[in-house]
Amino acid sequence: AEVRYWGIDVAASGESYSAGRWARDAKVWIDDIARRGKLPIVCGGSGFYISALLEGLPPGDATDPALRSALAAWGRARPEAAHRFLEVNDPPSARRIPPANLRYTLRALEILLTTGSRASERPRPGGGWTARWRIVKIGIQPIREDLYARIATRVAWMLDAGWGVEVRRLLEEEV
């Protein structure tokens, strides 16, 4: 109640909301907070989103829904082949992405097949926007068992609070 949150309920349930879009929105929110003399704090979520905000994303649209769907079907049937294909065509990405991470493997392949360039070699525009900020990154690495216990407690609380009803309603909206 004492802290204002940003970035909640910013997209409709069926709407695509990417790391790039989030980074563009977050810059507006951060600038607004700073303009009012307050300290912007970005927390939670994926390190990828923080990188998108601080370092930018490579230019150009590297998505192809039809290709993504075809890759997903192929990758589910042959995950080892997907990672091997990545090893041959983008070795730095293959070294960075564990073979068990099919989602990231397929995303790197989608970038390669859509743009013709390796995901590992795509330039990022840099942090021109961040030059005026003193950025402090803090990572929290809880004990795995404690983290899982907290997640289980949180999921139980969400289910008790009506999460299942909300999910069913959202799924009905999609139909």
Image (cartoon, rainbow, N blue to C red):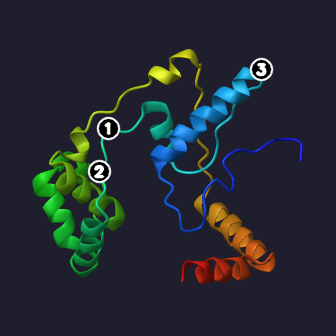
Mark 2 surroundings: few (<14), some (14-19) or many (≥20) residues within 10 A = some
Circle 3/circle 1 CB separation < 8 Å = no
In x, y percent, where is residue 73?
A: 27, 78
Circle 2/circle 1 CB separation < 8 Å = no
Q: Residue furthest left?
A: 88
Callout 1 amino acid:
Pro
Determine the residue positioned at 59% across, 48% down: 141
Vertical placement of 1 versus 146: above or below? above
Q: Residue furthest right?
A: 1
Determine the residue positioned at 61% across, 63% down: 12
Q: Which mark is residue 130?
A: none
Total labels: the figure holds: 3
Residue 59 in which image quadrant? top left
Say which quadrant the C terminus sits in: bottom right
| Label 3 residue SS | loop
The residues tagged by marks 3 and 1 sit, at their Cα atoms, a distance apart of: 32 Å
The mark that comes first in sequence, 3 or 1, is 3
In x, y percent, where is residue 15?
A: 53, 62
Mark 1 surroundings: few (<14), some (14-19) or many (≥20) residues within 10 A = few
- The residue beneath circle 2 is 62
| Label 1 residue SS | loop
- The residue beneath circle 1 is 59
Vertical placement of 71 versus 162: above or below? above
| Label 2 residue SS | loop
Q: Is residue 48 visible?
A: no
Callout 3 amino acid:
Gly
Left or right: 104, with 29 as reference point: left
The residues tagged by marks 2 and 3 sit, at their Cα atoms, a distance apart of: 37 Å
